[in-house]
Every structure is written in C-alpha cells, then in structure tokens.
Image (tube, rainbow, N blue to C red):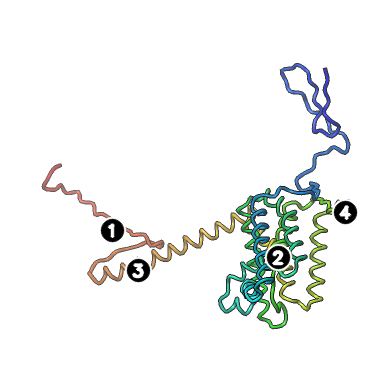
C-alpha cells in the first residue's frame, strides 16, 4: 500500500512494513525548503498579543485622553501636551522624562495610525523571534537613543530644531531589526499583490524620510524618526549578535575586576603604612592579597610533647 503526501510536502514516504525507516525521496522542483533568511511574509493580521498589544493599547488610551482634554479642557490638554513632547531645551534643563513620554504624544491622527500599524504588523513577528522583554528594550531603548542624539544635534543651532512627537523612531528601529533578523525575507504589502524584499522596504522608507528631512530643513521630528533606523541597528549589534554580546560582557566583567583589584591594592597600601607606624612590616602581592611571612623552620624539639 502506498500513500503520497501533497505535492509540496518535504518527503515522499512509502508506507511499508519494515524495521528500517523509509528513506526520503528528492523534493520535486519548486518544493525546496526555504531557509529562515528567505522566508516569505504575507502581511495578514498577526496575533494581537504580548508587548505589541500593551504598547498599542497604552498609546491609544493616552491619545484618546489627550484628544478629550484638548476638546473639553483646552488649557489642561495643551499643558499635558507641552509636558510630554520632546523639547531639547527642556530636556537639557532637567525634563529627562520627555525622552520616554514623547512617543505617546500625537497631534496628527494619520501619523498616530501609521505608527501603530507599523508597530503592529512588523513588531509582532519581531517579538515572536526575540521575546517580549527584549522587545520592550528595543522599543524604549531606540526611542531614548534617537531622542538623545536628536537633542545633542539641536545644540548646533542649525539642525534638529523644533520638537518631536510620536513613536516613528521605534517603528523604524523595529523595521531595521526585522530586516537584520530576516535579511532575505519577502513581504507582501497589503493591498499590493507583489512580494517585495524587506531590504528594499527599508531603503524606500529611509528615502522617503530623508526627503521629508530635507523638505522641513532638518527638523527635529524627522531627525529623530530617521535616527530610529540607526538605533535599531545599534540595538541589534549590542544585544542580538552573539559574538559582540559575549565580548561586551567579557569587557564589562574585566573592568569590574580591574576596579576591585585597584581597590584592594589601595587598601593594602594604606594598611602597610598603618602597620609601619606600629613597627611591623606586612606584605601584599600585586593584586592586593596579603602575603604571610615565611615560617622559620625550627628543628629543635620543644619542651612539650603532644
């Protein structure tokens, strides 16, 4: 009796009674397995869960509350908006919380919708690959890095002027990490029925944002959004590349151990000075460890016997 799997199954298995497993037959043309780097991602509706769900729900709640305040209590709404948006001068004078609050501040409903749609469609597969905790780190870390660099650039007085709002930087960072995790992936952008390499999606978005950056004379808003791509690449390099992560942790442990050895040597020198004042000499090695004096061998028998 012979049973065949569908045409694009991985193996053709012949169901025979045997003590040995059946050997797999060659795959049919066009049915080759796709490596993780050459997967095809169709932009359907991914699962709405995890960190992506929490971020979208919180952003929506904040935006609705802000809209209601602006509609029914304009003074309070404008004050809350001014406290939350990214303003370089206020950040430099102590309002550091703006590096975390500005992604939840939106004025344009279209910008709000596009940012959260990008986080939903691209963020869900990224979270499934790296986990919720790392996704939170990617989201907030990229926003803080992009915002901080934007604030630093604003000190030039020429570029990165104005204010910044929205989570566009985080959406760009998530897109960059998605590309780095799936470099050869093809995605089908709804409603366009064409598979596009993720590499060209990243290039296209970067080109559009660069055009906006030039049109608005290097405004802080578009500087921060474009910096999100670099923040995503930096985060991937530091936390997802195995070799770099190991080397970084080794360096951190090495610095910590060097600091502890320096503290021991310093304490040893102080103790030596103290003991010399009391006519006693003590010795320490180069690591600050105490070296007891050599015991003198006494071959003479004492007056007592154990």
Q: What element carries label 1?
A: loop
Labelled pair 1, 4 in contact (Cβ < 8 Å): no
Between discs 4 and 3, the one toward the N terminus? 4
Mark nearer the viewer, 2 or 1: 2
- Residue at horizontal 71 percent and vertical 58 percent from the top: 174
Front one among 202 and 265: 202
Percent x, y of residue 2: 83, 20
Q: Which of 93 and 37 is in front in this view?
A: 93
From what the image shows, is residue 25 above or below residue 145? above
Find the distance from the CA under tag 4 to the CA under tag 2. 25 Å
Left/right of residue 64 with respect to residue 300 in the rendered view: right
Give the residue displayed 83% in from the left and 63% down from the top: 204
Residue 93 at x, y percent in the picture: 57, 79
- Nearest to N terminus: mark 2 or mark 1: 2
In the displayed structure, 242 sits above or below 280; it is: above
Question: CA separation, marks 1 and 4?
Answer: 82 Å
Q: Nearer the viewer, mark 2 or mark 3?
A: 2
Query: How far apart, in angstroms, are the residues tagged by discs 2 and 3?
Result: 52 Å
Question: Can residue 235 be seen in the rendering of this structure?
Answer: yes
């Amino acid at each position: 009796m012979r049973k065949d799997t569908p045409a694009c199954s991985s193996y053709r298995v012949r169901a025979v009674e045997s003590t040995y497993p059946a050997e797999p037959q060659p795959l049919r043309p066009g049915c080759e397995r796709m490596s993780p780097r050459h997967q095809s991602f169709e932009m359907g509706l991914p699962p709405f869960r995890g960190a992506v769900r929490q971020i979208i729900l919180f952003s929506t709640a904040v935006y609705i509350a802000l809209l209601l305040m602006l509609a029914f209590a304009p003074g309070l709404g404008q004050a809350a908006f001014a406290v939350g948006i990214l303003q370089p001068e206020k950040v430099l004078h102590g309002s550091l919380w703006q590096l975390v609050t500005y992604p939840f501040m939106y004025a344009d409903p279209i910008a709000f919708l596009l940012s959260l749609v990008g986080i939903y469609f691209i963020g869900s597969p990224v979270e499934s690959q790296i986990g919720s905790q790392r996704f939170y780190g990617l989201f907030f870390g990229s926003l803080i890095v992009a915002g901080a660099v934007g604030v630093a650039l604003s000190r030039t007085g020429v570029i990165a002027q104005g204010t910044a709002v929205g989570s566009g930087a985080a959406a760009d960072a998530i897109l960059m990490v998605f590309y780095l995790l799936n470099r050869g992936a093809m995605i089908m952008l709804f409603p366009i029925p064409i598979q596009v390499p993720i590499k060209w999606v990243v290039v296209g978005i970067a080109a559009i944002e660069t055009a906006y950056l030039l049109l608005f004379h290097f405004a802080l808003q578009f500087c921060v959004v474009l910096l999100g791509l670099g923040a995503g690449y930096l985060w991937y390099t530091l936390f997802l590349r195995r070799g770099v992560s190991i080397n970084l942790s080794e360096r951190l442990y090495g610095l910590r151990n060097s600091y502890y050895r320096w503290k021991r040597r310093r304490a040893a020198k102080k103790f030596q000075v103290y003991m010399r004042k009391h006519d006693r000499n003590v010795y320490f090695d180069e690591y600050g460890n105490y070296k007891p004096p050599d015991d003198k061998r006494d071959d003479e028998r004492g007056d007592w016997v154990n």
